Amino acid sequence: MSETRHTKVLIIGSGPAGYTAAVYASRAMLEPILVQGIEPGGQLTTTTEVENWPGDTEVQGPDLMIRMEAHAKAVGTEIIGDIITDLDLSERPFKARGDSGTLYTCDAVILATGARAKWLGLPSEEKFKGFGVSACATCDGFFYRGEEIVVVGGGNTAVEEALFLTNFASKVTLVHRRDELRSEKILEDRLRKNPKIEPLWFHEIEEVYGADNPLGVEGVKVKHTKTGEVTDIPCKGVFIAIGHAPANELVKDTLETHMGGYVVTKPDSTETSIPGVFAAGDLTDHKYRQAVTSAGMGCMAALEAERFLAEQED
Ligand code: FAD
Ligand code: NAP
């Protein structure tokens, strides 16, 4: 039988934005419920060293997220392992349906569903997903010990993944569509100094190819973006690191979005186009997309939810 749970504040998402919102909402005695989603801890659980979280010169992403969860729990947040599949914002109390069957009702909601990896969209990429094609070096790098690997992209993620994969691979080719990286300079320096990494500028993946039985990648065909020339790179693993798109499925038809689906919030605020609905972190942020900025927005969302609820009682 499905259960109904009511809370003043429902927090959807368990990345830095969600857990920070939980800490602030709990300390404001709002007794929030936080629903973790399919990736408890969020994107940082897919990386290794985080070197820009203030207070930690270096911390492992998964460890940092375990600490955030423990902090939220310690101050009184109820943390639930469920996935919200449907969100009705047409009237208050808002209604969120969990994959478990539970119906969550709430007076205010904080959306912190973050972002997800983008894919190239090639049929051959789809065919070999999980069989040589991956978007998570920390999850899958270990399978490619002594093998050649291709990483696609030119941002922080691609450079970090390429560097990390040199722990396993005999060679990493970084395929980028331009000849300029958009990663931080410190990472670019490390990349250029690493003898195992070979950048391949002005190239895009045209096809991933491999064996059918058993399914496995054997290489990629890459095309020069200017000359159109196609060449072949033999490899066993292909890591796609071309950015992330906001996880807006729950609200894309009900809230205003912009810049490719990011939820619009009012200036200097986490308020969305619906009163009582707040959005924080990568779901709203097309510009910074950092753990610390997400956490900051989580704090803002909880404080704004507290103020909103107080005004309802006046
Ligand atoms: P996310 O971390 O994306 O978490 C989203 C949460 O929402 C997840 O818990 C998910 O399960 C949940 N969710 C989604 N949909 C639902 C649903 N329907 N129901 C319930 N829950 C749902 N930033 C840095 O500052 N430093 C770094 O070193 C750094 N390294 C990175 C390395 C990698 C490989 C990647 C991918 C990102 C990195 N980032 C880094 C960026 C950083 O991870 C993000 O900016 C940050 O995690 C965003 O936090 P968030 O809380 O908005 O969302
Ligand atoms: P990103 O900064 O958006 O970079 C995406 C890269 O992929 C770009 O170089 C882009 O090329 C390329 N690309 C996009 N679509 C492509 C396509 N269809 N085919 C080929 N190439 C394509 O994404 P990200 O690297 O995932 O970073 C996302 C956010 O997380 C950033 O804000 C980043 O700072 C943050 N992050 C931070 C850290 C850290 O602080 N250490 C680590 C990881 C991520 P162009 O350059 O030509 O556009």
Image (spheres, rainbow, N blue to C red):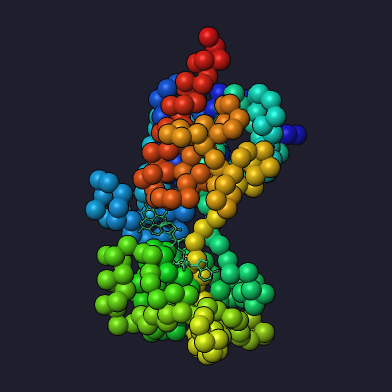
Q: Is residue 159 left or right of residue 275?
A: left
Residue 109 placed where, x, y %? 57, 31
Q: Is residue 173 visible?
A: no
**Is residue 181 shown above or below 270?**
below
Q: Quadrant of residue 294?
A: top left
Q: Is residue 157 visible?
A: yes
**Is residue 192 shown above or below 61?**
below
* In front of the other: 307 or 180: 180
Q: Quadrant of the N terminus?
A: top right
* In front of the other: 198 or 96: 198
Residue sitting at the far front: 226
* In front of the other: 240 or 267: 267
Residue lying at 40% horizontally and 76% vertically, measured from the top left: 179
Q: How many marks?
A: 0
Residue 307 placed where, x, y %? 47, 20
Q: Is residue 80 left or right of residue 179?
A: right
Residue lying at 38% horizontally and 72% vertically, measured from the top left: 180
* In front of the other: 36 or 243: 243
Q: Is residue 291 left or right of residue 90?
A: left
Residue lying at 27% horizontally and 46% vertically, measured from the top left: 54
Residue 102 placed where, x, y %? 68, 35
Residue 150 placed where, x, y %? 47, 79
Residue sitting at the far top: 314
